[in-house]
Image (cartoon, rainbow, N blue to C red):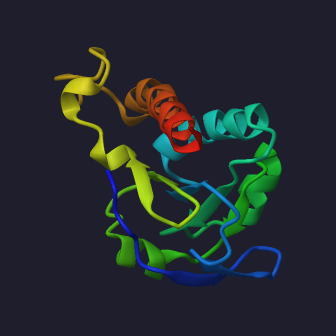
Amino acid sequence: MDWQPPAWELTDANGEAFHYPGDLDGPAVVLFWASWCPYCKALMPHLQTIVEERGGDIPVLALNIRDDEDPRTFMAEKGFEFRLFPGADPVAEAWGVKSTPGLFLVDAEGRAVFSNYAIPAEDYPEDVQGLVEELKHWEEAAIKAPFWAEYLRHAIDRTLL
């Protein structure tokens, strides 16, 4: 994957403006998420582990979308160290995000070099292939989340070479 997503400007949960891609200091994870999404809930602890493993050199930009709950409360309760952007629905629309989670790795110039949407179906674990209709969302999420995180780790390693 090599795609230049549209630029955006949002104010984070701390009231600080962020201009994408101009304010990037290097590669970053861009996550479109909602507090009600079982896939997001399963994925986010893996992303926190990646943040900790990398010593914070790969930030997570957490763009909250389609959410009636307060994302600040969710983040605080879970202890996630992500930069939170509430009300990011216009950015999701501009980026073509149709479902949550939307997981992207962008390089220092803001080019998307990985997305969970771009993973071929045949690369998914056998637990998921052909069983999607039989699995409950939380069951599928429990399988897909570590898989997405591992794919993301490989993409980060390739990006930092």
* Image position of 137 with respect to 65: above or below: above
Left or right: residue 97 versus residue 108 is left
Question: Which residue occupies the extreme front position in the image?
Answer: 161
Q: Quadrant of residue 147?
A: top left
Number of callouts: 0
Vertical order, 46 against 11 (above or below)? above
Q: Position of residue 88 (x, y in %)?
A: 54, 75
x and y, in percent, of residue 73 in the image: 77, 60
In this rendered view, identify the residue nearer to me: 31 or 18. Answer: 18
Instruction: Tell me if 82 is positioned left or right of 160 in this view.
Output: right
Q: Image point 24% across, 30% down: which residue? A: 132
Q: Residue at x 75, y 64 (%)?
A: 72
Q: On the rendered image, what quadrant is the C terminus found in?
A: top right
Q: Position of residue 12 (x, y in %)?
A: 72, 75
User: In the rendered image, is residue 70 in sight?
Assistant: no
With 8 as the anchor, is 94 left or right in this view?
left
Q: Is residue 43 left or right of residue 73?
A: left
Closest to the observer, 58 or 11: 58
17 shown above or below 71? below
Answer whether residue 153 is visible to the viewer in this image: yes
Spot the residue most to the top: 126
Rendered residue at 68%/63% (across/down): 71
Q: Where is residue 57 drawn, in percent x and y? A: 75, 47
